Amino acid sequence: MPELPEVEMVRRSLEPLLVGHKIVGADVLFEDYLRECSGNDVCSLVEQRFHQLVRHGKYLYLMVDERELETHLGMTGRLLVCGRGEERVKHTHVCLHLDSGQELRFIDPRRFGYLRIRRTGAAHERQSMLGIEPLRPDFTWQNVEKALRGRKAPLKSLLMDQKIVAGLGNIYADEALFRAQLNPCQPAGALSEEVYQRLCDAIESVIADALGAGGTTFSDYVDANGDGGEFYRSLDAYGREGQPCRHCDTPLVRMVLGGRSACYCSRCQPLV
Ligand SMILES: [Zn+2]
């Protein structure tokens, strides 16, 4: 599932292909992909020009003159910019024709993602509903502590709660906890300042490294040009159940926490 680094790579790769370009036509092939809007709303975007692409957590906003296109990639979503004549792959749900002769395609085989046409200001409202976000100036260990202090839930569950930390999912929560040497089950609310600092640093370093590697591609995630990310080579914890810990060789274990799996090293990541 695309998390902060993958959605940010999509944003960066789309930016030069969209900003300044006008929508000159639209095809809605699968209306169920639209959320709280209709095919007519999509067609009303014709003549509008993209001027900015903004990401908050895992949400991406494509700003046009008088609307904001909110999109979420769900599990398998792709936003590709293709030549108008290129064959459309299966599960292409919406195409926006651009004045560059290319088209922006919204593709999503498993359909957990969506496109929603919203009025101006929606991105700002979304941001106010999300928690602190790695790599932004207010992502400090003090604010991480403030978000977690007093909470009894396990660290892993809270790191994946978008209202607490925006942009993390299963992959980067596992990786950050491995780097911070913290147990996924650790109650989040009563840690020392030193531990909150370690956690904050681990989250920021894992997100920065993943961005540097272009994100993590297992099968679905690609950027707007169709290129995948290489960070899967650097994963220490996620998906490595039974494989030796890169620090101590102990086989990693998997547990289920709130319906989601967590992979960790029982030796390097003890409860504190
Ligand atoms: Zn270990």
Image (cartoon, grey):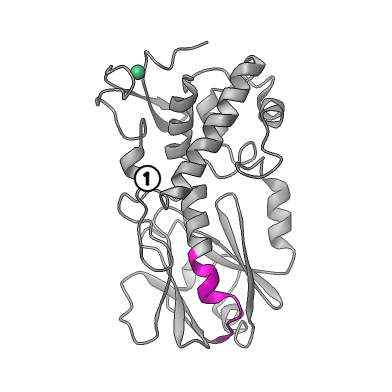
Is 62 located above or below residue 233 in the figure? Answer: below
Q: Position of residue 247 (x, y in %)?
A: 34, 20
Q: Secondary structure at mark 1?
A: helix
Q: Position of residue 18 (x, y in %)?
A: 54, 75
Give the extent of the magenta segment: 13-23
Is 37 located above or below residue 20 in the figure? Answer: above
Q: Is residue 32 magenta?
A: no
Decide which of 177, 131 is in the foreground and name it: 177
**Amino acid on which disc 1 is placed:** Phe
Decide which of 214, 128 is in the foreground and name it: 214
Q: Position of residue 267 (x, y in %)?
A: 37, 13
- Horizontal side, residue 260 vs residue 115: left or right: left
Q: Is residue 17 magenta?
A: yes
Q: Residue at x 70, y 43 (%)?
A: 137
How crowded is the residue under tag 1: few (<14 C-alpha within 10 Å), some, or many (20+)? some
- Horizontal side, residue 261 vs residue 44: left or right: left
Q: Which residue is mark 1?
A: 231
Residue 160 showing in the rendered view: no
Q: Residue at x 36, y 20 (%)?
A: 265
Q: Position of residue 98 (x, y in %)?
A: 51, 84
Q: Residue at x 46, y 27 (%)?
A: 179
Is 238 located above or below residue 213 in the figure? Answer: above
- Horizontal side, residue 152 vs residue 87: left or right: right
